Image: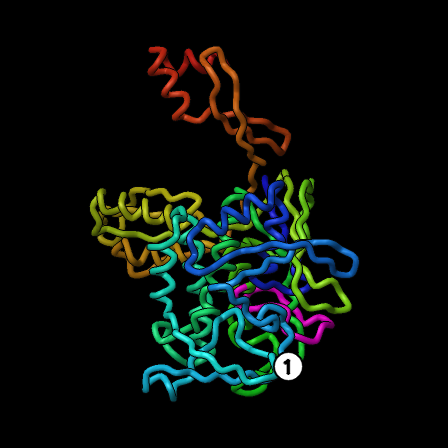
Amino acid sequence: MRTLYIECSMGAAGDMLTAALLELFEDKEKVVDELNSLGIPKVRFESSVMSKCGINGTHMTVTVDGEEEDESMHDHDHEHEHEHHHEEEEHHRHHEHPHHPDHHYHDTGYAHHHTHSHSSLHDIEHIVRDHLGLCNNVTQDIMSIYGLIAEAESAAHGKPVDEIHFHEVGTMDAVADITACCYLIDKLKVDKIVASPVCVGSGRVKCAHGILPVPAPATAYILKDVPSYAGDIRGELCTPTGAAILKHFVSEFGSQPVMKVDKIGYGMGKKDFEAANCVRVFLGETSDISEQIFEINFNVDDMTGEEIGFATEKIFEAGARDCFTTPVYMKKNRPGVLVTIICDGGHKENIINAVFKHTTTIGIREKVVQRCVLDRKNVKLSTSYGEVNAKVSTGYGVTKTKVEYDDMSKICNDKDISVYTFKEDL
């Protein structure tokens, strides 16, 4: 099983995760060019080599309309107050807007006078869905992560999610970080993502609205149910964006699993501490795997077959690993359908939203289940009828090979042979 392990002993931030993931690719410049071609408005990615405590890694710089956010906003150590002057409509002038969710606190030490325009979650969705040429899986991942951030900001500021606004430069910087991480993870085609417990840092941070504890309220909210600890570093090590990316993608938090590592990446932050300020990632193979997944199910007795089929498609688009139906008899012996969904923790909330949106159910059940899986990889096989794609699964003392159905059916149709005749050649 292709597994990605993320070491968060110095926390996590969007730019550091992006840089670490970038290091897993052979041609980093080509991948950076791909990120720049995604069409994120006014955004440009640049990577550079950076050294921390004698270790070389990659630092990712994101500029928005040629402007890079203050170093302090990326580097988890906030000490000074930053004054904002908003020149907006009258109803905004006396209303405190939350700052960009990955960069709550500013430590430049001087008053910075500029005009901000603000974006809502709806504006961000418009950018992601209508302006970026991304596949549906990546788009869904981005919006799910932003949903986690908006929910956390809503809880921290006591405002409904639809009233949360982010200032323009910070918004695009966060969109860039989240989009890049989702794009790179999709490109890696991993089967499982595991992370260490998250070090959040300690102490206090001073912002324009007062002194707040570390982790920041939004970060603490997102990391509920995620193993975390303060550590010895004084400063903010984990940002809301970093926390949300981990919360969405990671299916298991713990020590590094037994794996054959073939690639290692280091994503560097700008600040220097007594420990190397980096996120480290390991990419490799694990076998004989037992993992935790979620099983979601619900009953319906008032949907047609076509309606259930449409809902199933939407559930798969939301990230389900599997979705199947079973005929059942419900109360008063009414015939109905039991819908069962298998998913990982990162896609669970997105799937739940899809279920309530596209089905008539008013309640669902969920449980954590343990499953054993074989290590799987895609290969090409040569047959007397030509080359075909196949999946080879190994582990627990067995090896299984299965040819992709589309390749097999095309050959059988072209050669006018049966499936059994084709399989005899394997």
Residue sitting at the far front: 66
Give the answer, above or below, for where 208 lies relative to 43: below
Residue 348 horizontal side relative to residue 14, left or right = left
SS majority, magenta: loop
Q: Is residue 236 magenta?
A: yes
Q: Position of residue 16 (x, y in %)?
A: 61, 59
Residue 319 is at least partly visible in this image: yes
Q: Amino acid at mark 1?
A: Glu
Q: Is residue 390 magenta?
A: no
Magenta highlight range: 224-241
- Residue at (64%, 30%) from the top-left corner? 397
Foreground residue, 221 or 128? Answer: 128
Q: How many marks?
A: 1
Quarter that holds the N terminus: top right
Q: Which residue is mark 1?
A: 79
Give the answer, above or below, for where 262 lies relative to 104: above
Foreground residue, 217 or 27? Answer: 27
Residue 254 is at least partly visible in this image: no
- Tell me the SS state at disc 1: loop
Q: Position of residue 156 (x, y in %)?
A: 47, 78
Q: Residues within 10 Å of mark 1 (few under 14, many from 20)?
A: some
Give the answer, above or below, for where 115 lies relative to 168: below
- Residue at (52%, 81%) from the top-left corner? 112
